[in-house]
């Protein structure tokens, strides 16, 4: 197989694990046309009954932000919600191709309109996929993304880096991911045994302590859907993660990787937490984009994820800043403000939103991962068995 075919095969077989007779939705940008075609072909080859591409386009998005009101950009659309409900009833698989063709697309745009979106549709989509249906998000190379990484649109060089990160350079990439998933799942099982009640990140400019929900599970490598079919939500993935108690986060973080947020590039971000809430934000650039997102809903200012990544990560070993959260978050430890993963707490998927929040889970239309790990990061966990080192100077020691 050529490179794009190998990419598509990993997405369909190891990522969404498309089953015969299943419907597939593919969310992608026009910049990913060639890759999207290969993914569609691979899905049909796996036996998909139908594949529906859902296209986005950067310049069209900029036109909407420039000319439409924030109210219309965030307005509820009944037909879109009905479509999501039908996908859920049919048990579709969801594939999303990411990779900003132009991270500066919304430079100079009104940050309020740039952050506006139909929040109820996003919440419905997230509820559909989180723990109920199989889904995967994968980075797709394109010239604009390559220019952000290398300063020029060297797509070939980006493909080489992505191939390393996605294990496309192995004889059977899907099998290689199954092996890596087993290692990460083992780390999660070891963390579960410790019954941690809190976790602390310490590094250059970072000192954050986060409380954990009793009985929460640490997840690594992949998930299993309601029918018992395994899948990998993110490719590449090098993390072990859980959802914390949104009410218990205190301290400060300093990002070690840039963040691309709603078309704006955020550099040097510093965030302060108190009582589980973000209380202060500053940055060398792009702070307004972060502040606008934090006003999306009440849950946007609280954490929905804490994650552990060490220097063994293939992405970390490339030494590159990918300017793509999906990749950069797997180069180092990270946290995310916004929506929790209810599947991280046994039984929570079957609870209504109010009871999930009583447990400490967070509800929001946003979920933004920010990288705080890398050289010098130390992570400790505290529980009934005392305080243990998990990561020391970016190396897994547990």
Image (tube, helix red, strand yellow):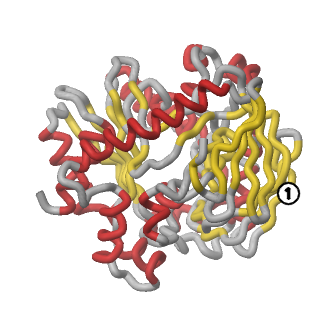
Residue 89: % across, % down: 37, 20
Residue 4 in which image quadrant:
bottom left
Q: Nearer the viewer, residue 281 or 254?
A: 254
Q: Residue furthest bottom?
A: 152
Residue 63: % across, % down: 51, 67
343 over 248 or under it: above or below = above
Mark 1 Cα-neighbour bin, 10 Å: few <14, some 14–19, many ≥20 = few
Residue position for label 1: 280
Residue drawn at x 74%, y 60% as measured from the top left: 203
**Left or right: residue 352 compared with residue 278:** left
Residue drawn at x 73%, y 31% as measured from the top left: 212
Number of numbered discs on residues: 1
Residue drawn at x 35%, y 34% as measured from the top left: 231
Residue 308: % across, % down: 59, 46
Residue drawn at x 54%, y 25% as measured from the top left: 343
Please state, as top left, top right, bottom left or bottom right, where the C terminus lies in the image.
Answer: top right
245 over 173 or under it: above or below = above
**Left or right: residue 23 compared with residue 395:** left
């Amino acid at each position: 197989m050529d490179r794009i075919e190998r990419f598509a095969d990993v997405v369909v077989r190891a990522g969404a694990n498309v089953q015969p007779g299943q419907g597939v939705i593919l969310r992608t940008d026009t910049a990913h046309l060639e890759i999207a075609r290969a993914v569609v072909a691979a899905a049909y080859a796996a036996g998909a009954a139908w594949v529906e591409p859902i296209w986005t386009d950067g310049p069209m998005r900029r036109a909407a932000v420039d000319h439409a009101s924030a109210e219309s950009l965030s307005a509820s659309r009944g037909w879109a919600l009905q479509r999501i409900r039908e996908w859920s009833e049919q048990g579709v698989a969801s594939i999303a191709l990411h990779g900003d063709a132009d991270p500066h697309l919304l430079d100079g745009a009104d940050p309020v309109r740039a952050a506006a979106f139909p929040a109820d549709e996003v919440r419905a989509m997230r509820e559909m996929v989180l723990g109920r249906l199989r889904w995967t998000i994968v980075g797709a190379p394109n010239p604009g993304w390559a220019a952000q990484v290398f300063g020029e649109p060297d797509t070939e060089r980006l493909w080489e880096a992505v191939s390393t990160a996605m294990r496309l350079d192995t004889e059977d990439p899907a099998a290689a991911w199954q092996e890596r998933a087993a290692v990460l799942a083992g780390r999660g099982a070891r963390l579960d045994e410790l019954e941690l009640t809190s976790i602390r990140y310490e590094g250059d400019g970072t000192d954050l302590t986060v409380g954990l929900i009793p009985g929460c599970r640490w997840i690594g490598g992949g998930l299993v859907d309601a029918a018992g079919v395994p899948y990998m939500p993110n490719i590449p993935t090098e993390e072990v993660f859980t959802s914390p108690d949104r009410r218990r986060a205190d301290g400060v973080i300093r990002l070690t990787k840039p963040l691309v947020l709603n078309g704006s590039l955020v550099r040097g971000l510093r965030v302060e937490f108190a009582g589980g809430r973000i209380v202060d934000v500053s940055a060398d650039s792009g702070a307004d984009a972060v502040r606008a997102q934090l006003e999306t809903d009440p849950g946007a200012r609280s954490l929905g994820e804490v994650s552990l990544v060490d220097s063994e990560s293939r992405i970390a070993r490339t030494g590159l800043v990918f300017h793509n959260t999906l990749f950069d978050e797997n180069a180092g430890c990270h946290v995310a403000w916004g929506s929790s993963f209810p599947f991280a707490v046994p039984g929570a998927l079957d609870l209504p939103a109010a009871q999930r929040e009583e447990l400490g889970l967070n509800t929001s239309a946003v979920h933004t991962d920010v990288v705080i790990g890398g050289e010098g990061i130390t992570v400790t966990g505290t529980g009934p068995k005392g305080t243990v080192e998990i990561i020391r100077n970016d190396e897994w020691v547990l």
